Image (cartoon, rainbow, N blue to C red):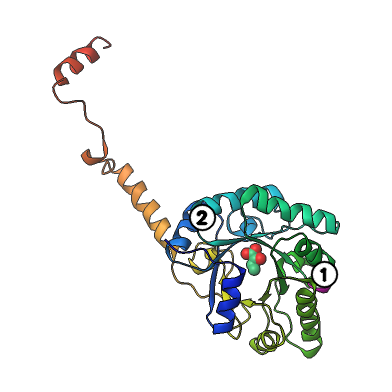
Amino acid sequence: MPKKKGRLEFLEMKKKGEKVTWVTAYDYPTATFAEAAVLDMILVGDSLGMVVLGYSGTIPVTMEDCIRHCQAVRRGAPNTFVMGDMPFGSYQVSDEQAVASAVRFLKEADMDAVKLEGGVRVKSRIRAIADSGILVCGHIGLTPQSSGPMGGFKAQGLTPESARYVIADALAVEEAGAYAVLLEGIPPELTEFIHRRLSIPVYSIGAGAPCDGQLIICGDMLGQFQAFTPKFVKKYANVAEVVTAAFRQYADEVRNGVFPGDEHVYHIRKGCEEEYAEMLKEYE
Ligand code: KIV
């Protein structure tokens, strides 16, 4: 059984240059697979809105959705560091609202940490959550909850002007007391700079290799989510193909009488076949 890692182990890994492995999961079976593969961290992302619930973005995802999926993941991965993602609307109103939402992730779903999107504009939220004793991870660069104002899911920091905003966000996240920061959709040159400049662990999703670890969306890497595939995704499996083929074969076998076979049924208890047949006759 893997030993559950925490903030100190992640700092130690950073010091030694060991990369953290991190995937999203939203349900019990996927969480069991992640733990069996001894991954370091799991994020129950609000990407569940797209990957699992079929929304076109993350905005409709609620606290109830997130808590329910976090609980399932925790049951599947009791020995893995699991982070809950704060959905849109759960921290926008005030610092007090942010703390109350973060507290729910710990009390109701046994999460080890929470994540929220934004840097400079959510600095007081991060500080309030960190001051209440909860590990909080920042998420900057391409932030899906802001894809509307950003004009879509677009890479950030590609020009010097845009990179200044990302750097300001990174500094704000660290100053506010986040224990780590996740960079999404920025160039590796900027990732390398931020990694050098900050002392907290710096993780990447679509931000290249020069940092402390990688996150990937399970639906993307497993080939489950088919609406679109970002450039930064590598597919390690094609679950959609495997599952569709299995469903097709099942349907064929049912239609052709191949399934269920004799090995898939319960037989009448040995010795009472005759009595059974007599009993059925009474109803004819
Ligand atoms: O919800 C999520 O999975 C995320 C990742 C895109 C970083 O926030």
Residue 62 in percent (x, y) is at 71, 51
Ligand 1 closer than 8 Å to label 1 CB: no
- Observer-nearest of 218 and 125: 125
Residue 19 seen in the current view: yes
Mark 1 or mark 2, whichever is nearer to me: 2
* Location of residue 58 (image quadrant): bottom right
Against 258, residue 145 (above or below) is below
Q: Secondary structure at mark 1?
A: helix
Question: Disc 2 designates what residue?
Answer: 78
Residue 225 is covered by the magenta coloring: no
Q: Quadrant of ligand 1?
A: bottom right
Residue 85 as seen in the image, left or right of residue 73 = right
Residue in the picture at 21% in, 38% down: 262
Question: Which comes sooner in the sequence, label 1 or label 2?
Answer: 2
What's under tag 2, amino acid-wise? Pro
Quadrant where the C terminus sits is: top left
Assign the N terminus to one quadrant of the image.
Answer: bottom left
Q: Which residue is mark 1?
A: 123
Question: Which residue appears farthest toward the top when viewing the image?
Answer: 282
Q: Residue 34 location, x and y as percent?
A: 47, 62
**Nearer to the camera, 118 or 55:** 118
Distance from Cα at disc 1 to Cα at disc 2: 31 Å
Q: Which residue is depicted at the point 63% across and 80% down?
A: 207
The crowd level at tag 1 (other Cα within 10 Å; few <14, some 14-19, many 20+) is many
Query: Could you tell me if the residues under marks 1 and 2 are in contact, i.e. CB atoms within 8 Å?
Result: no
Q: Which residues are magenta?
A: 119-123
Q: Secondary structure at mark 2?
A: loop
| Quarter holding residue 231 | bottom right
Label the magenta part by its dominant secondary structure. Answer: helix
Kind of residue at badge 1 = Lys
Q: Would you say 257 lies left or right of 158 here?
A: left
